[in-house]
Amino acid sequence: MDLPAFVKNEQGLYHVQGCVKPEQIVSTAASILLEDLTQQERLTQPTDAVRFMQLALAAEPNEHFATLFLSSKHRVLHFERLFSGTVDCAAVYPRVVVQKALACNAAAVIFAHNHPSGCCEPSQADRNITRQLKDALALIDVRVLDHLVVSRSEWVSLAERGWV
């Protein structure tokens, strides 16, 4: 029987059992950040979402589109990778995003996807899907707070660029 690679003690500290692959470390770090985000009363710093999304998505060899679903007070309700694609694109379906937002009873969302190339400059397709998702979610009173494009070393906020 395999023991877990990381074990959390009563003080909340982790120790490692055996050899651990780098991707296990990154995955565990993302899980720890997500746990921390869901325990906060509200998401107050955009950089908290960025750090988590970078750990969760940036190392992937293909594009992944994910969403943080938030309450009306911006408490993290749920995180989910909704779509996976190829090295340079992922098909995103607004209908699925709307269904998930309703299932989570979300009042707001933060989108993110990775650019495996390492260049985080948003494409016109990124801007278009953000607009389509914003329009679809507006019909059910769910606000789009941001759409982040992440890589291992950088990130871009479409909200900061005025595109949300």
Image (tube, helix red, strand yellow):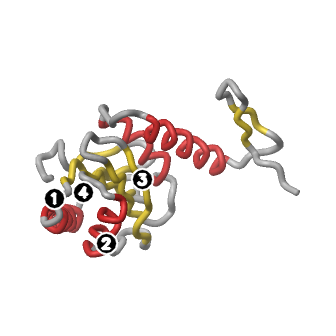
* Residue 118 horizontal/vertical position (percent): 40, 53
Is the C-beta separation of discs 1 and 3 under 8 Å? no
Q: Name the residue under label 1.
A: 141
Between marks 3 and 4 in the image, the one whose residue lies nearer the viewer: 3
Mark 4 vs mark 1: which is more N-terminal?
4
- Look at label 3 and name its amino acid: His
Residue at x 36%, y 59% (from the top left corner): 104
Q: Name the residue under label 3.
A: 78
Mark 2 crowd level (few <14, some 14–19, many ≥20, 10 Å Cα)? some
Mark 3 crowd level (few <14, some 14–19, many ≥20, 10 Å Cα)? some
Query: What is the total number of numbered labels drawn onto the structure image?
Result: 4
What SS does tag 1 mark? Answer: loop
* Residue 93 horizontal/vertical position (percent): 29, 75
Mark 1 vs mark 3: which is more N-terminal?
3
Q: How far apart are marks 2 and 4 (CA)?
A: 15 Å
Mark 4 crowd level (few <14, some 14–19, many ≥20, 10 Å Cα)? some
Q: How far apart are marks 3 and 2 (CA)?
A: 18 Å
Q: Is residue 57 visible?
A: yes
Between marks 3 and 2 in the image, the one whose residue lies nearer the viewer: 3
The quadrant holding residue 12 is top right
Between marks 2 and 1 in the image, the one whose residue lies nearer the viewer: 1
Q: Name the residue under label 4.
A: 122
Closer-to-camera residue (95/75): 75
Residue at x 42%, y 48% (from the top left corner): 53
Q: Is 18 positioned to the left or the right of 84 in the image?
A: right
Q: How far apart are marks 1 and 3 (CA)?
A: 18 Å
Is the C-beta separation of discs 2 and 1 under 8 Å? no
Residue at x 33%, y 45% (from the top left corner): 155
What SS does tag 2 mark? Answer: loop
Q: Residue 92 carries which label?
A: 2
Mark 3 vs mark 2: which is more N-terminal?
3
